[in-house]
Image: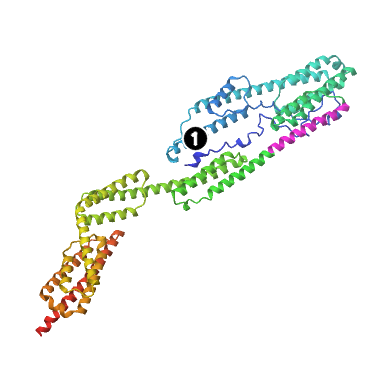
């Protein structure tokens, strides 16, 4: 598995998705966000309420993001078809969500490919059927937003001209007490129009508002109005500002600190648009609103500090995962089980990685690149290991196939001895050859095993009669040994004729089963040596008197030559046996023991013939 195909990096700015953007204004600190006093309040009192810069309209309430590519495209179409403006933050969030969904689909396809037996190297990223539609809708949305921004800019310029015209009219009415007195109704209309007129270019907002406030104050200074009307305006403004204070205080209970912060911006805008209150109440009402604003701002700040702390914690956790993968040394993995277990460990680490949220924005890409590089190193080493394993298995398969071919060629051979020896050596060689691929292992083994079994079954059928004859010979020689044991137990040693008759019968009896031959021969010669020794000790003269020396000498000579021929045959066979396999070495040892035993028997025959030849030599002398 190629790990870069399993884990896709999140977009670089996803970790700070809640950070205010140019479309979501940030409230100034509580000490600087309060609105300036209305125009009819005295300048000295107005100075106690710092002016706040104008802010743009708050962003629309966030909707839950769709989680599929088709739903995202559908949302873009709805946005393009709707009359409402498109927020940049929502557009960017939809774009990030689409590519996350695409990355998840690619990862799922890769996992399915690998689960089906493929490898990361053979995986081909499938084409995205929705990409053209998505890009088209995204382009339309951007175009719509650009048009909306352009229209908003034109509108803000128009609003600027309208408000400048209002200021000029108020300035004219504030020129003298008479103009102020007769223009009060017009003044109220102008202030209402001012509130209804939308935002102006931000760079002109503060200056424009100060100029408006200046001439409004001048108008009120020039106005000769009854105390009752003035008190009524103050009362209504106090009611409005008291309601704004209550709503700002209620924002402390809002579960979402970001939503509370955005709502506070709207309340500040309304505060700035509300006229003054009585001079003696200005400080108190402003202090109340300021305190509520400070509480909301602190919650908002604490929220982002907590978010930052979580991102740092996520960075620590992801760094630990990187170190765990980097600590894995592929050189220490030798068995298939070790490679598979380590692969499962890394896949578990990758799954854990996916559960961890974003890190600080500047670290998102570097930490992911580090993790992906560590995973890639392991999976590349794994690929190289299995490639080498496949090459070794291919070489092993070639060797085993050659043995199977040779075994099949020997399966019908009738040269039983050499062929059996060769097949035994081939079986030992087969055991020294390493493993082959699972799909080929059984087939080549069946070929080799079937060929070997065919030969040995044929040999068994061909030598079945020989084995029966050897069993019969075994029983006959056991009977001879029994008779020799009876003679050895008798109080007097047997005569030479009896021993020669038993020896002749033994020599005339054919081969016995190979595995029982050595033990049988040892017992036979042991008894024969004992009986001859007893005979020579007890009655050498009687034996000589009753025996025919010439005839006995002839039998001994024939036996001597037979054993010499057998020794020569065994020594010749040794030159054809290989000792490279365990079977060959064992066979050489067995033949060596036979030759040694035959030489011992040959020496005994030589001694016996020398004993017979001694009287004849003495007579000739």
Between residues 301 and 272, which one lies in front from this camera angle? Answer: 301
Q: Which quadrant is home to the C terminus?
A: bottom left
Rendering coords of residue 454 (x, y %): 25, 48
Q: Quadrant of residue 50?
A: top right
Position of residue 450 relative to residue 185, above or below, is below
Q: Main secondary structure of the magenta part?
A: helix
Rendering coords of residue 95 (x, y %): 57, 30
Between residues 362 and 339, which one lies in front from this camera angle? Answer: 339
- The answer to if 302 sits in the magenta stretch is yes
- Judged left or right of residue 116, residue 298 is right
Between residues 492 and 173, which one lies in front from this camera angle? Answer: 492
Position of residue 574 relative to residue 21, above or below, is below
Tell me if I can see residue 32 in this picture.
Answer: no
Point 78% across, 31% down: residue: 292
Point 13% across, 69% down: residue: 558
- Residue identified by numbered label 1: 108
């Amino acid at each position: 598995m190629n790990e870069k195909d399993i884990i896709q990096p999140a977009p670089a700015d996803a970790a700070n998705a809640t950070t205010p953007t140019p479309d979501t204004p940030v409230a100034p600190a509580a000490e600087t966000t309060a609105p300036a006093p209305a125009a009819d309040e005295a300048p000295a009192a107005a100075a106690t309420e710092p002016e706040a810069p104008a802010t743009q309209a708050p962003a629309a309430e966030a909707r839950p993001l769709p989680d599929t590519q088709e739903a995202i495209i559908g949302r873009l179409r709805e946005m393009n078809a709707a009359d409402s403006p498109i927020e940049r933050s929502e557009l960017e969030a939809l774009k990030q969500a689409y590519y996350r969904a695409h990355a998840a689909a690619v990862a799922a396809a890769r996992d399915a490919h690998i689960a089906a037996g493929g490898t990361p190297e053979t995986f081909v990223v499938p084409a995205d059927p929705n990409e053209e539609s998505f890009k088209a809708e995204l382009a339309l949305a951007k175009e719509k937003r650009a048009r909306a921004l352009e229209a908003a800019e034109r509108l803000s310029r128009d609003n600027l001209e309208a408000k400048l015209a209002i200021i000029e009219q108020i300035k004219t009415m504030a020129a003298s007490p008479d103009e102020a007195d007769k223009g009060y109704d017009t003044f109220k209309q102008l202030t209402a129009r001012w509130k209804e007129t939308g935002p102006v270019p931000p760079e002109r907002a503060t200056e424009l508002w100060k100029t408006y406030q200046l001439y409004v104050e001048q108008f009120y200074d020039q106005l000769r109005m009854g105390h009752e009307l003035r008190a009524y305006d103050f009362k209504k403004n106090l009611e409005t500002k008291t309601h704004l204070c209550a709503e700002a205080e209620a924002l402390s209970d809002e579960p979402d600190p970001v939503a509370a912060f955005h709502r506070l911006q709207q309340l500040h805008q309304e505060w700035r648009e509300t006229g003054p209150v009585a001079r003696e109440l200005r400080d108190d009402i402003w202090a109340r609103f300021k305190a509520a604003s400070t509480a909301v701002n602190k919650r908002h700040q604490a929220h982002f500090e907590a978010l930052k702390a979580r991102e740092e914690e996520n960075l620590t956790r992801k760094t630990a995962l990187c170190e765990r993968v980097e600590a894995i040394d592929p050189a220490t993995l030798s068995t298939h089980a070790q490679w598979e277990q380590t692969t499962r460990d890394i896949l578990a680490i990758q799954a854990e990685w996916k559960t961890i949220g974003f890190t600080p924005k500047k670290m998102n890409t570097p930490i992911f690149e580090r993790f992906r590089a560590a995973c890639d190193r392991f999976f590349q080493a794994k690929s190289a290991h299995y490639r080498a394993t496949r090459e070794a298995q291919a070489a092993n398969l070639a060797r085993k196939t050659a043995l199977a071919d040779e075994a099949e060629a020997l399966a019908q051979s009738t040269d039983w001895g050499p062929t059996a020896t060769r097949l035994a050596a081939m079986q030992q060689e087969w055991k020294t050859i390493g493993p082959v691929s699972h799909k080929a292992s059984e087939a080549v083994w069946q070929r080799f095993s079937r060929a070997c079994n065919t030969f040995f079954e044929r040999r068994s059928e061909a030598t079945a009669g020989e084995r029966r004859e050897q069993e019969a010979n075994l029983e006959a020689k056991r009977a001879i040994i029994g008779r020799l044991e009876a003679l050895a137990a008798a109080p007097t040693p047997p005569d030479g004729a009896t021993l020669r008759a038993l020896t002749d019968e033994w020599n005339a009896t054919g081969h016995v089963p190979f595995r029982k031959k050595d033990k049988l021969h040892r017992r036979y010669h042991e008894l024969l040596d004992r009986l001859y020794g007893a005979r020579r000790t007890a009655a050498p003269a009687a034996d000589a008197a009753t025996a025919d020396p010439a005839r006995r000498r002839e039998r001994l000579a024939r036996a001597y030559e037979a054993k010499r021929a057998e020794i020569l045959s065994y020594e010749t066979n040794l030159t054809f046996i290989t000792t490279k396999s365990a079977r060959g070495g064992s066979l050489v040892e067995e033949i060596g023991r036979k030759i040694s035993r035959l030489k011992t028997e040959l020496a005994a025959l030589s001694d016996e013939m020398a004993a017979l030849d001694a009287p004849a030599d003495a007579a000739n002398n």
